[in-house]
Image (cartoon, rainbow, N blue to C red):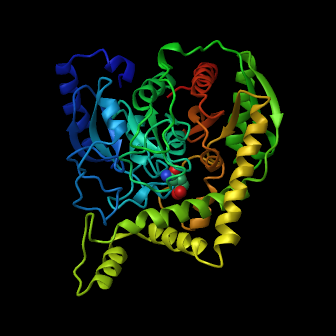
């Protein structure tokens, strides 16, 4: 597959032919990574997750409740894509409302991992990552609330980047947990991730949490030779499978050999991150999803009165995982529990951020696993708590609002990709990409 950088040099005619080819290859692949083949704009085709609005396209967040809903406008990330030589092409499968880690909760059925078709591609941006990995998309957009870009990228051997909270406008992104959500790129390599990130980022008055900064050109200024101080979190690693630990140790050696300085640090137990995230994310989700009532968007159930309409539409329209989160979220926000859970979680969130900031006083970047294992088999994760645990390395970064990038470093004995992530200080994407480019070169991952 040609890279995004190469594709940007192709003519309109070449790209049109290319789209037809992509569509037939995607259909033949049987991966269920694409759930639609609409196109909008002109330029290099970029695959779009089903929770980002593209004007006149269906946008359903892979939910039954949004069947039939057509987006009335382009998300700002899409407007920005189109202004930078790219277009929206095709809908990527995902977990319903971006809640999940496997893409199995999609109304359209699970996506398969191209590295092992009995395996999940990760989630929630599983369709985006599987398509890029399988060579049926040049690059894709995903969204990351607690790891949904980085973890599928790691499971599928591609690059996934979560920008600092506030860097990319959330206008036109279906809200899951508004204080954590960010749109970001899933690509074949680090340079393409920088190109796509550069294109979509920027201040947007339509998103009140959007940050006001000069737009810097990162992709053309990546310094692969910059020497950085990289922190490794010693007490994190033992919780990962042995093959992940080995890949981690090898990567640390490769980074040292490339001239980076390694410093050793400890952080609090990841179990606090999981508890904090699943209180805050579900609280926000319960609030955000209250708008889907059968009146304003998508599917409407037959009913005799308004109460029954809400009840039936929501009962029939939401899947099991989404209902679980709405219940949890309403519980932690209810009077009597609000202080004990929600407020406490907000306090822990501050502690998480303080802990990262303390490390960034001595280090430019942090190296961490993305997930404790390689991609599990389809159907293997039954227990929701088991699934939540698999987010232990990614969610703290969203709680702290930091930028991070996941890149493939090795494969296990069965040929399944292993990804690791670099984490940077808020708004320091330049350092993140410099480090990632150097790490990509140092580990020399073979697809
Ligand atoms: N797996 C996490 C969750 O289910 C993260 C999902 C995401 O980043 N959208 O909430």
* Left-right relation of 121 to 437: left
* Residue 107 placement, left or right of 18: right
Residue 79 falls left or right of residue 414: left
Residue 349 image offset from top left, x and y in percent:
68, 53
Which image quarter: residue 96?
A: bottom left
> Is 382 displayed left or right of 130 in the figure?
right
Nearer the observer, 414 or 135: 135
Report x, y in % for residue 27: 25, 43
- Closest to the observer, 191 or 351: 351
Q: Residue at x 55, y 71 (%)?
A: 328
- Residue 380 at least partly seen: no
Q: Quadrant of residue 134?
A: top left
Residue 55 vs residue 208, the one in the foreground? 208
- Vertical comparison of 363 with 37: above or below: above
Q: Residue at x 47, y 65 (%)?
A: 287
Give percent across and percent down for residue 410: 60, 32
Position of the N terminus, as image quadrant, is top left
Q: Locate residue 276, reporting x and y percent.
A: 66, 59
Q: Nearer the viewer, residue 155 or 400?
A: 400
Q: Is residue 413 above or below residue 347?
A: above
Q: Is residue 384 above or below residue 420?
A: below
Identify the image quadrant of residue 365.
top right
Query: How many numbered callouts?
Result: 0
Q: Is residue 110 visible?
A: yes
Please tell me which residue is depicted at 45% across the width and 52% down the height of the picture: 118
| Most distant residue in the bottom direction | 304
């Amino acid at each position: 597959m040609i890279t995004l950088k190469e594709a940007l040099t192709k003519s309109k005619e070449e790209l049109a032919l290319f789209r037809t080819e992509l569509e037939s290859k995607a259909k033949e692949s049987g991966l269920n990574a694409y759930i639609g083949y609409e196109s909008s704009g002109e330029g290099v085709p970029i695959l779009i997750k089903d929770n980002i609005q593209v004007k006149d396209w269906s946008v359903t967040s892979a939910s039954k409740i949004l069947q039939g809903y057509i987006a009335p406008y382009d998300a700002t990330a899409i407007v920005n894509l189109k202004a930078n030589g790219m277009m929206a092409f095709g809908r990527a499968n995902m977990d319903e409302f971006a809640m999940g880690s496997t893409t199995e909760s999609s109304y359209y059925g699970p996506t398969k991992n191209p590295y092992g078709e009995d395996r999940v591609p990760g989630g929630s941006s599983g369709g985006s990552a599987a398509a890029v990995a399988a060579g049926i998309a040049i690059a894709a957009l995903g969204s990351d609330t607690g790891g949904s870009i980085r973890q599928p990228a790691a499971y599928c051997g591609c690059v996934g980047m979560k920008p600092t909270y506030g860097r990319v406008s959330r206008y036109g992104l279906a809200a899951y947990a508004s204080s954590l959500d960010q749109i970001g790129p899933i690509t074949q390599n680090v340079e393409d991730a920088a190109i796509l990130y550069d294109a979509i980022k920027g201040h947007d008055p339509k998103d009140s949490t959007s940050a006001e900064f000069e737009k810097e050109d990162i992709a053309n200024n990546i310094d692969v030779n910059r020497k950085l101080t990289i922190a490794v979190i010693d007490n994190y690693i033992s919780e990962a499978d042995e093959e992940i630990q080995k890949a981690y140790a090898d990567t640390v050696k490769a980074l040292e050999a490339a001239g980076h300085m390694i410093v050793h640090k400890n952080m609090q137990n990841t179990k606090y991150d999981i508890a904090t995230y699943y209180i805050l994310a579900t609280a926000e989700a319960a609030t955000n999803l209250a708008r889907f009532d059968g009146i304003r968007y998508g599917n409407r159930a037959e009913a005799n009165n308004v109460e029954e309409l809400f009840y039936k539409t929501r009962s029939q329209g939401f899947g099991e995982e989404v209902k679980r989160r709405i219940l949890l979220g309403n519980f932690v926000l209810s009077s009597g529990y609000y202080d004990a859970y929600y407020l406490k979680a907000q306090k822990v969130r501050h502690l998480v951020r303080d802990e990262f900031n303390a490390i960034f006083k001595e280090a430019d970047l942090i190296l961490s696993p993305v997930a404790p294992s390689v991609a599990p088999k389809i159907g293997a994760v039954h227990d929701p708590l088991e699934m939540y645990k698999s987010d232990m390395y990614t969610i703290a970064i969203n709680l702290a609002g930091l930028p991070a990038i996941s890149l493939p470093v090795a494969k296990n004995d069965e040929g399944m990709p292993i990804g690791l992530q670099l984490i940077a200080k808020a708004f320091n994407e330049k350092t993140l990409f410099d480090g990632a480019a150097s790490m990509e070169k140092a580990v020399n991952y073979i697809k």
